[in-house]
């Protein structure tokens, strides 16, 4: 018996030894490298207005190469094109409340001077706001569905007045003449009250309630703080607003109009970024900026409890919208590793339909990278948050070059959202650390205000410390770290190359500010209400501040730049003028430094046309491969200059 047991045991052991364990190859071993054409063929879809009968959704998509309007069945199916613009992008706003006419907006190739357009059901289109040189912003439909509200600076280019557009004859009526330079909130459902916001600085603002009947203006906030109107209660008795009064993060308050009392409604450990009620007040939707990612709560007002939203692996719901009958919800779900897809969700049956699959079918999802939130200590011990994209092929045995990514602003925030450009660079073996330097939003008002009148100094040092954090990661080639950014991030790129010329190996400047004096003097006229606040943060170019502004403007210190540079710019940019890029390129080229300049005649502040994105981002990667990775083309030589200037 013992012998039999021993033989069986030996057989089992032998069998285990003979059984081959299948070893699956790692992602790094099977990783495919995608072209810029493949990566930019991911579709971007947003919006989602339900038709009156809920059978369709109206959306915007860039599948044609630029944004156009499409309809799609709420149950899913093919996109039906509504517009076919091949120049300026078309952005859908909404179906009309009681029929299938459509409202949309367009500017002129990125100049940000938007007009509102009507598309009739038979297909004809009409500019409803044909005011020469005036910018128009949609502000919502009236409660009775007979009109809509919009703001326009047609009377005075500096200020946005509030108008009501009648849907019968499309004649606008001036409701509020904005002579004081307020930012206008959404009007109450009964048309009795209008929130007005007056900026104090780039964080703080006073909130007022204007009464149409008696022309009264009542201040809502008690102390200097950041205040923003969110929505009125359905019965019009109260105004909901966010404030950071006495706190680091914004929380939700309710102001009772009849007696002027205030009560705290909701507070979280992060900023409450927005809150509104659905059509009849059944739900309250609240957005929370939780560590650079949207967290959404939908409260059932009858029960006071949050409803359970659909769950996803490795992605999250980023945006929601409701049908007027409050029975159906459309939402987007995505993350840093995938563009957001559109879904329709029946709140009663819990049935869920995925409407889009926007990731290019040629791209394997597992080959994209999920970002990781990290934190590091800066030069003075301040903790700096950042978002880290580590290439699959990166390891201690295969060190990769890296880029410090700086967001726009000042006061912006790098978010845990999908970026085709970042994923393209990461797929090609570049690690990316998106630094939320001091002055970034989302981390408390103290952190937000830390860079006031200190730009190009401590915020830049945070970026340098981000580079130092990268050098400590075993998978990073410490000698090959560059810096990249757009708008204010482009300024930070040029500041890094100018004021810390030996820290970064290369710079990628996407439409960045290089002359603060000119930029602040030439801001768009419709920023007038925000101008004084902007001057308090950055400095007044028409005062003694101009000395400091000149000192921190890279244009006046181009002789310090020694590292290769690529600059990309849109000729129609109303915020950062083309002259900013023209002059920085000319100045740096005098040093004999390699410089490439890519200019797009039909783009504004950011590139929205796919053909331009493909050219821009392919040029960025080619530049990085030569001057950072140094595994293509000719290595860097002293005095070499890249003369390629691509005008599209």
Image (spheres, rainbow, N blue to C red):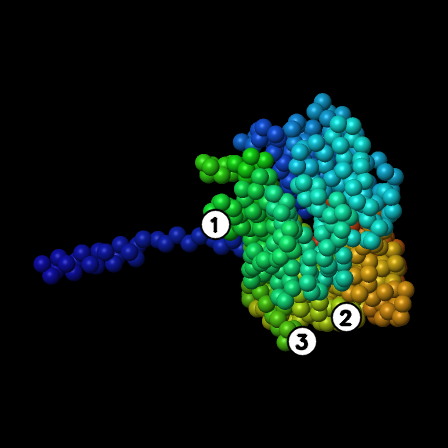
Lateral position of residue 636 relative to residue 292, left or right: right
- The label shown at residue 305 is 1
Q: Is residue 132 visible?
A: yes
Q: Is residue 614 visible?
A: no
- The label shown at residue 379 is 3
The answer for how far apart the CA atoms under marks 1 and 3 are is 45 Å
**First along the sequence among labels 1 and 3:** 1
Compared with 268, 548 (above or below) is: below
On the image, the x and y values in percent for residue 105 come to 75, 38
Q: Say which residue label 2 marks.
A: 454
Residues under numbered marks 1 and 3 in contact, where contact means CB atoms less than 8 Å apart: no
- Which mark's residue is nearer the viewer, 1 or 2? 1
Lateral position of residue 507 relative to residue 340, left or right: right
Residues under numbered marks 2 and 3 in contact, where contact means CB atoms less than 8 Å apart: no
Mark 3 secondary-structure assignment? loop
The answer for how far apart the CA atoms under marks 2 and 3 are is 15 Å
Residue 321 image-quadrant placement: top right
Residues under numbered marks 1 and 2 in contact, where contact means CB atoms less than 8 Å apart: no
């Amino acid at each position: 018996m013992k012998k039999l047991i021993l033989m069986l045991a030996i057989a089992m052991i032998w069998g285990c030894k003979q059984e081959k364990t299948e070893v699956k190859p790692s992602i790094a071993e099977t990783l495919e490298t995608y072209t810029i054409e493949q990566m930019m063929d991911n579709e971007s879809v947003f919006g989602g207005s339900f038709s009156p009968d809920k059978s369709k959704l109206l959306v915007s998509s860039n599948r044609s190469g630029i944004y156009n309007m499409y309809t799609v069945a709420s149950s899913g199916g093919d996109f039906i094109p509504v517009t076919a613009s091949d120049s300026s992008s078309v952005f859908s706003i909404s179906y009309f409340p009681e029929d299938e006419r459509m409202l949309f907006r367009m500017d002129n190739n990125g100049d940000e001077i938007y007009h509102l357009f009507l598309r009739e059901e038979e297909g004809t289109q009409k500019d409803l706001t044909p005011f020469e040189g005036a910018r128009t912003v949609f502000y919502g439909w009236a409660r009775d569905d007979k009109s809509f509200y919009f703001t326009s600076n047609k009377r005075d280019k500096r200020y946005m007045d509030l108008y009501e557009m009648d849907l019968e004859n499309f004649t606008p009526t001036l409701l509020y003449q904005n002579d004081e330079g307020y930012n206008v909130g959404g009007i109450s459902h009964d048309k009795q009250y209008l929130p007005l916001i007056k900026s104090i600085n780039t964080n703080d603002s006073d909130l007022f309630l204007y009464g149409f009947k008696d022309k009264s203006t009542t201040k809502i906030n008690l102390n200097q703080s950041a205040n923003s109107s969110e929505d009125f209660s359905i019965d019009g008795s109260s105004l909901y607003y966010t404030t950071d009064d006495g706190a680091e993060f914004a929380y939700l308050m309710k102001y009772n109009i009849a007696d002027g009392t205030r009560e705290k409604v909701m507070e979280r450990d992060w900023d409450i970024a927005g809150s509104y009620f659905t059509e009849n007040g059944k739900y309250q939707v609240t957005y929370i900026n939780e560590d650079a990612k949207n967290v959404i709560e939908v409260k059932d007002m009858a029960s006071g409890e949050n409803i359970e939203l659909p769950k996803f692996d490795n992605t999250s719901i980023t945006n929601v919208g409701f049908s007027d009958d409050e029975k159906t919800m459309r939402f987007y779900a995505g993350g840093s590793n995938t563009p957001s897809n559109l879904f329709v969700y029946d709140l009663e049956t819990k049935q869920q339909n995925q409407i889009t699959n926007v990731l290019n079918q040629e791209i394997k999802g597992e080959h994209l990278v999920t970002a990781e939130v990290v934190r590091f200590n800066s030069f003075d011990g301040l903790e700096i948050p950042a978002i880290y994209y580590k290439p699959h092929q990166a390891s201690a045995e295969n060190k990769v070059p890296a880029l410090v990514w700086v967001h726009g602003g000042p006061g912006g925030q790098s978010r845990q959202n999908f970026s085709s450009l970042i994923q393209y660079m990461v797929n090609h073996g570049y690690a990316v650390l998106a630094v939320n330097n001091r002055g970034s939003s989302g981390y408390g008002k103290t952190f937000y205000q830390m860079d006031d009148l200190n730009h190009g100094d401590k915020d830049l040092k945070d970026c340098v410390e981000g580079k130092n954090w990268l050098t400590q990661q075993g998978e990073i080639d410490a000698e090959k770290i560059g810096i990249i950014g757009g708008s204010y991030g482009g300024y930070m790129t040029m500041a890094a190359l100018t004021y810390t010329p030996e820290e970064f190996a290369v710079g990628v400047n996407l439409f960045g500010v290089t002359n603060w004096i000119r930029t602040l003097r030439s801001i768009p006229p419709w920023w007038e209400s925000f101008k004084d606040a902007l001057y308090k943060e950055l400095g007044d170019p028409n005062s003694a501040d101009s000395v400091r502004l000149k000192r921190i403007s890279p244009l006046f210190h181009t002789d310090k730049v020694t590292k290769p540079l690529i600059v990309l710019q849109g000729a129609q940019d109303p915020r950062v003028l083309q002259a900013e890029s023209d002059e920085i390129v000319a100045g740096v080229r005098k040093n004999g430094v390699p410089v490439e300049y890519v200019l797009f005649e039909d783009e504004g502040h950011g590139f929205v046309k796919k053909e331009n994105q493909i050219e821009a981002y392919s040029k960025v990667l080619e530049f990085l491969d030569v001057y950072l990775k140094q595994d293509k083309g000719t290595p860097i030589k002293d005095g070499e200059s890249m003369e390629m200037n691509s005008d599209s």
